[in-house]
Image (spheres, helix red, strand yellow):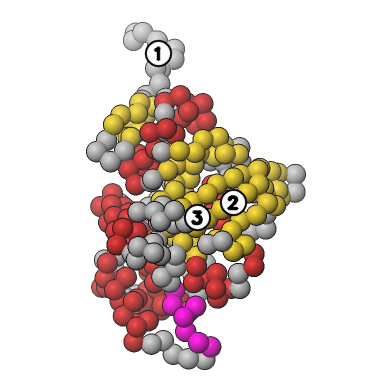
Amino acid sequence: MTTGEVMVSARGVGVRIGAATLLSDVDIDVAAGEWLTIIGPNGAGKSTLLRVLAGLLPATGEVRIGGSPVTALRRRERARQIALVAQDPVVPPGMSVFDYAMLGRTPYIPPLAAESAADLAAVRDVLARLDLTGLTDRELSTLSGGERQRVFLARALAQGARLLLLDEPTSALDIGHQQDVLELVDELRATGPADDPLTVVATMHDLSVAGEYADRILLLAGGRRVALGAPAEVLTEDLLATHYRARVRVVDGDHGPLVVPVRRTPRNRGAAG
């Protein structure tokens, strides 16, 4: 549920590295409590935009988080406001699942102080909700890709940030854990405090999943915003054919449009003989 407050505001965002333009003149507003999913073909600028929103990548234009320029937020304050789950985070060698998840509480622990009982409880609760309790003492290097993905999310959720940025959060998960993770994120969004709800911005390749969970979808192509609106407005056969060069059929699902790939008619299928 949204509050009407704008949690994320981006105006004229552009990123250029050398001769390559990764983003160009992107404008978006995301309301507090909203779930916005960013889609687009490979190289469209999805992950780049997420890093700009997190304040991790220099860009032209302006990004505001909760009304404040993201570049003006000090590191600790930014970590209290924004939690990012990258596709492949850097993990310190030898770190256990519990210790990695506890890193999410760093913005709340005073320098040279130990974690509090509340910090420990917050981490244990998140690990339990992500089906990770039995792995708390394991080193991350010994886990499967899907298990590591859930640990990365656990650290982000332990931060208790108002804005959750997810870069392909289900890419390494089996279908059951995909649903577990997305339902948990949606539950946290729905059950948070009414005056300070969780806002979610995610990138996704699975268009059906995007359509089921997002309130709105942003379609990027070539680093530019080409469509923004409700899932049914963006996930259309014409738009997907144009920007993904894909042949699909879009059908109504219980919670949003479902995108079904349709095999192209084979060319030059000669007669048997």
Residue 268 in the image: above or below residue 139: above
Q: Is residue 243 visible?
A: yes
Q: Position of residue 23 (x, y in %)?
A: 64, 45
Q: CA distance from mark 2 to mark 1?
A: 50 Å
Nearer the viewer's eye, disc 1 or disc 3? 3
Image point 36% across, 40% down: which residue? 211
Under mark 2, the amino acid is Ala
Residue 271 figure quarter: top left
Q: Residue furthest right?
A: 19
Q: Is residue 172 left or right of residue 47?
A: left
Q: Are marks 2 and 1 in contact (CB under 8 Å)?
A: no
Specify few, some or many for label 3: CA neighbours under 10 Å numbering under 14, 14-19, or 20 or more: some
On-image quarter of the N terminus: bottom left
Closer to the eye: label 2 or 3: 3
- Tell me which amino acid carries mark 3: Val
Please tell me which residue is depicted at 44% across the width and 53% down the height of the picture: 4
Q: Where is mark 1, residue-wise?
A: 269
Residue at disc 2, secondary structure: strand
On the image, the x and y values in percent for residue 253 come to 27, 35
Mark 3 element type = strand
